[in-house]
Image: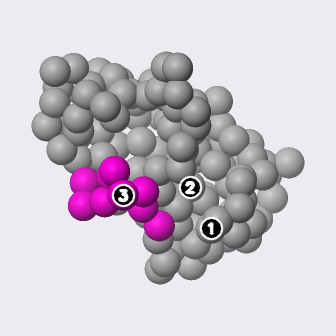
Amino acid sequence: QVRLVESGGGLVQTGGSLRLSCAASGGTFSYWVMGWFRQAPGKERERVASVDRSGVNTYYADFVKGRFIVSRDNAKNTVVLQMNSLKPEDTAVYYCTAGVTLGDMPSYWGQGTQVTVSS
């Protein structure tokens, strides 16, 4: 069983930055493809970014390309989402995830952390 705990959410103004962190425990961290999803009120969950086991290959949704950066530290069992140039439409609950492949739905989810971007 993998446990994922997010931190770093909060309130920020348009154009600002936030750094989300996710600490993983249980299992072998380097086995998992790690990622971030988000869900805004009244909308479905959507994939934001993912990083492969080595940390070399990444995926970004079009709506965050050039603004967000995902990275991982296999020695510390952590994954980070650096969010820059934030927009009000980035307001959502952000979830850390662990899965087997970049494209499939994740196997494990964190509890989520709220990100609110004010205009």
Q: Residues within 10 Å of mark 3 (few under 14, many from 20)?
A: few
Kind of element beneath mark 1: loop
Q: Residues within 10 Å of mark 1 (few under 14, many from 20)?
A: many
Q: Main secondary structure of the magenta part?
A: loop
Amino acid type, residue under disc 1 in the picture: Leu
Q: Which mark is residue 41?
A: none
Q: Which residues are magenta?
A: 59-67
User: Residue 58: x, y in percent?
Assistant: 47, 71
Point 16% across, 21% down: residue: 119
Residue 1 left/right relative to 56: right
Q: Earlier in the sequence, mark 1 or mark 3?
A: 3
Specify which label sits upstream in the sequence, 2 or 1.
Answer: 2
* Residue located beneath label 1 in the image: 102
Q: Are marks 2 and 1 in contact (CB under 8 Å)?
A: yes
- Which residue is pictured at 49% across the width and 19% down the height? 41
Tags 1 and 3 touching, CB below 8 Å: no
> Residue placed at 65% from the left, 37% from the top?
110
Q: Is residue 90 magenta?
A: no
CB contact under 8 Å: marks 3 and 2: no
Residue 59 lies, with reference to residue 108, above or below; the image says below
- Position of 115 compared to 40: left or right? left
Quarter-wise, where is residue 53 in the image? bottom right
Sooner in the amino-acid sequence: mark 3 or mark 2: 2
User: Which marked residue is nearer to the observer: mark 2 or mark 1?
Assistant: 1
Query: Disc 3 marks which amino acid?
Result: Asp
Residue type of the residue flagged with mark 2:
Gly
Residue 85 in picture, x, y percent from top left = 18, 44
CA separation in Å, label 1 and label 3: 15 Å
* Residue that mark 3 sits on: 62
Residue under label 2, please give it.
Answer: 35
